[in-house]
Every structure is written in structure tokens, then in C-alpha cells.
């Protein structure tokens, strides 16, 4: 199978970017999207052309590093997958595929398809720690947690921090990401001692870094590869209001 790949090329953060179209051949239909980019880069290198810079790590849908905008959708034309879990059988042979980096002021382009997502790290750092004992696992019955709360907490903790929510949101909001991080701890006893400080600090850091406001369009929920829902945004709002009243 062969494709025409229209890729955003940008030498560095200060350079002006542009699209370049390349023809890639010898792609298996069961190849992942990142494997297709590997094949394309190998063909470019053989022609003496600088390869396309793109981010990746686990290639198992865990790390969130493979964040690309493919044919106008975060992570491409499939549901609840990261880009590394997208396969070339989703594209017609000979199709032109447009590949872009995340488009957000909070995620500046470093080179080509690689963006700087340190803003998420700064929000997490603002959230701080939990003052519970670490080390050997406690007995399962030591801290009683209802099944429903445990499941909801795990759903929130499934967020991989890829940034699809920000890239998809018309406002560039990071509310779903922040909500997932706050909600995963707010539902558990271990997260209660620092709950108020955590909610205030993470929302303040999000605002400081220039992310947009949430207007509940649910685009973030639709494109999240782990299907983190906006129910967690509602919980974040409650946690934040409680924190403000406790000041």
C-alpha cells in the first residue's frame, strides 16, 4: 500500500512552518501509523532528506507521547485510541493523509510534529503530594473504599496526559486533564488531606499557563483516547468551590 502524507514541517520553535507532501510506499495495512512514519523517514533518509521529527515512547497507548493531529482529528480517524494504536487499514490506499502537531498556545511546536507539553508537568507539580505512607502495600481492608468510588477513581487515573483534550477544545482548555488528576485523588481517602490545596493550586497553575476556559462543548470527552468523561470536570468544580469556601 502507498499513501501521500502531507506533513507539517517546522525547523524549530522560532521558524515559520509549512506543509510538505511526501509519497510513501511499501506500507502494510496492519502497520501502525507510527510504523508508517518510520517507513517514510527511512525512505526520506535514503533520498538525503531530513527525517520528520515526531514524538513516541511506549507505542502501546500508555504514555501519550505519540500525540498527532491526523486528518483533522486528535489521534486520527478512530475512537478511543492513541496515534500509535491507529492502523493504516483505516485509510484508503493512495489517500492523502494530513498530519499536524497539536495546535495550542500552551503547547508550542519544538520541531515538525513535536510540541512542548511541559505545561502539563507544571500543573502536576503544582498539585503536590499526598501525605500517606508509601512502601509496602497495606492490607486491602485497612482503608475501606466503595467499589463505585474505586472504579471512578481508576477511570480518572486512566488519563495519559497526551493533550488531545487541549488540542481538540476550541478554547484550548486543560480542564479535562486537570479534572482527571484532581478527581482520581478526590474520590479516595488518601487524597483528602491535601484536597483543598490541590484543587486551588492546579486550577491556578492552569490559568497562569494560559489555557482557555471550559465551555462544556464535550469535544475533549469525544477525543480522549481513554474516554475520560466530563463528569470529572463537574467534580473538579465542586472540589474547587469547596476549597475556596474553606479559605
Image (cartoon, rainbow, N blue to C red):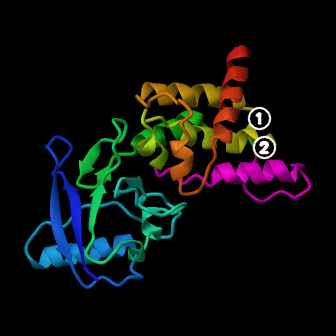
Q: Where is residue 54 in the image (x, y as percent from the top left)?
A: 30, 61
Q: Image check: 143 left or right of 212?
A: right
Q: Is residue 90 above or below residue 185?
A: below
Residue ID at (71%, 54%):
154
- Gap in Å between the C-alphas at discs 2 and 1? 7 Å
Residue ID at (37%, 71%):
33
As drawn, the label of residue 192 is 1
Q: Image check: 77 left or right of 115?
A: right
Secondary element under disc 1, as helix, strand or loop, is loop
Q: Is residue 173 magenta?
A: no
Q: Is residue 129 visible from the viewing direction of this image?
A: no
Q: Which residue is tagged 2?
A: 188
Residue range of the region highlighted in magenta in the rendering: 133-162
- Give the position of the N terminus as an image quadrant: bottom left
For residue 94, what is the image quadrant? bottom left
Q: Do the residues labelled 2 and 1 touch (CB within 8 Å)?
A: yes
Amino acid at each position: 500500500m502507498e499513501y501521500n502524507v502531507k506533513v507539517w514541517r517546522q525547523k524549530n520553535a522560532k521558524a515559520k512552518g509549512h506543509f510538505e507532501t511526501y509519497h510513501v510506499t511499501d506500507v502494510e495495512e496492519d502497520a501502525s501509523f507510527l510504523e508508517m512514519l518510520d517507513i517514510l523517514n527511512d525512505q526520506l533518509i535514503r533520498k538525503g532528506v531530513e527525517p520528520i521529527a515526531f514524538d513516541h515512547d511506549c507505542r502501546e497507548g500508555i504514555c501519550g507521547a505519540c500525540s498527532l493531529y491526523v486528518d483533522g482529528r486528535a489521534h486520527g480517524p478512530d475512537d478511543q485510541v492513541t496515534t500509535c494504536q491507529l492502523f493504516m487499514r483505516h485509510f484508503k490506499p493512495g489517500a492523502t493523509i494530513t498530519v499536524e502537531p497539536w495546535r495550542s498556545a500552551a503547547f508550542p511546536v519544538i520541531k515538525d510534529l513535536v510540541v512542548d507539553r511541559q505545561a502539563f508537568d507544571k500543573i502536576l507539580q503544582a498539585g503536590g503530594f499526598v501525605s500517606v505512607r508509601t512502601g509496602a502495600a497495606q492490607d486491602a481492608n485497612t482503608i475501606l473504599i466503595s467499589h463505585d468510588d474505586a472504579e471512578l477513581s481508576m477511570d480518572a487515573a486512566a488519563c495519559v496526559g497526551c493533550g488531545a483534550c487541549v488540542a481538540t477544545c476550541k478554547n484550548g482548555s486543560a480542564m479535562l486533564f486537570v479534572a482527571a488528576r484532581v478527581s482520581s485523588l478526590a474520590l479516595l481517602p488518601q487524597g483528602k488531606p491535601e484536597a483543598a490545596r490541590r484543587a486551588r493550586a492546579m486550577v491556578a497553575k492552569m490559568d497562569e499557563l494560559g489555557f482557555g476556559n471550559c465551555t462544556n462543548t464535550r469535544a475533549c470527552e469525544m477525543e480522549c483516547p481513554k474516554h475520560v468523561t466530563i463528569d470529572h470536570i463537574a467534580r473538579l468544580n465542586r472540589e474547587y468551590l469547596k476549597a475556596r469556601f474553606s479559605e
